[in-house]
Image (cartoon, helix red, strand yellow):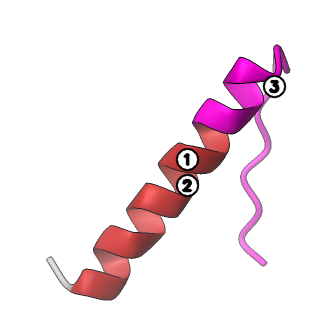
């Protein structure tokens, strides 16, 4: 796995956890 791909995976996971901790029922993942 390339480092950039790994970093993107971490970003998406972090974003999902962030929304989950905020109590948002539907986490949104931005591809921007």
Secondary structure category for the residue under label 2: helix
Q: In this view, does 2 lie to the left or right of 22?
A: left
Q: How crowded is mark 2: few (under 14 residues within 10 Å), some or many (20 or more)?
A: some
Asked whether the residues under the numbered discs 1 and 2 touch, taking CB atoms below 8 Å apart as contact, a structural biologist would say yes
Q: Distance between the residues labelled 2 and 3?
A: 14 Å
Between disc 1 and disc 2, the foreground one is 1
Asked if 15 appears above or below 21 in the picture, the reply is: below
Asked if 16 appears above or below 5 in the picture, the reply is: above
Q: Residue 14 carries which label?
A: 1
Secondary structure category for the residue under label 1: helix
Q: In this view, does 21 lie to the left or right of 22?
A: left
Q: Is residue 30 magenta?
A: yes
Between disc 2 and disc 3, the foreground one is 2
Q: Which residue is drawn at 34% across and 77% down?
A: 5
Percent x, y of residue 24:
85, 20
Q: Which residue is drawn at 35% across and 85% down?
A: 4
Asked if 5 appears above or below 16 in the picture, the reply is: below
Q: Is residue 4 left or right of residue 1?
A: right
Q: How far apart are marks 1 and 3 (CA)?
A: 15 Å
Between 3 and 31, the one lying in front of the other is 3
Query: Where does the magenta region start and end?
Result: 17-32
Q: Quadrant of the N terminus?
A: bottom left
What is the magenta segment's predominant secondary structure? loop
Asked whether the residues under the numbered discs 1 and 3 touch, taking CB atoms below 8 Å apart as contact, a structural biologist would say no
Q: Which mark is residue 12?
A: 2
Q: Residue at x 78, y 78 (%)?
A: 32
Q: Name the N-terminal-most of marks 1 and 3.
A: 1
Q: Which mark is residue 26?
A: 3
Secondary structure category for the residue under label 3: loop
The picture quadrant where one finds residue 17 is top right
Q: Is residue 3 magenta?
A: no
Q: Residues within 10 Å of mark 3 (few under 14, many from 20)?
A: few
């Amino acid at each position: 796995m390339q480092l950039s791909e790994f970093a993107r995976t971490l970003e998406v996971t972090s974003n999902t956890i962030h929304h989950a901790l905020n109590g948002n029922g539907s986490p949104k993942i931005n591809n921007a």
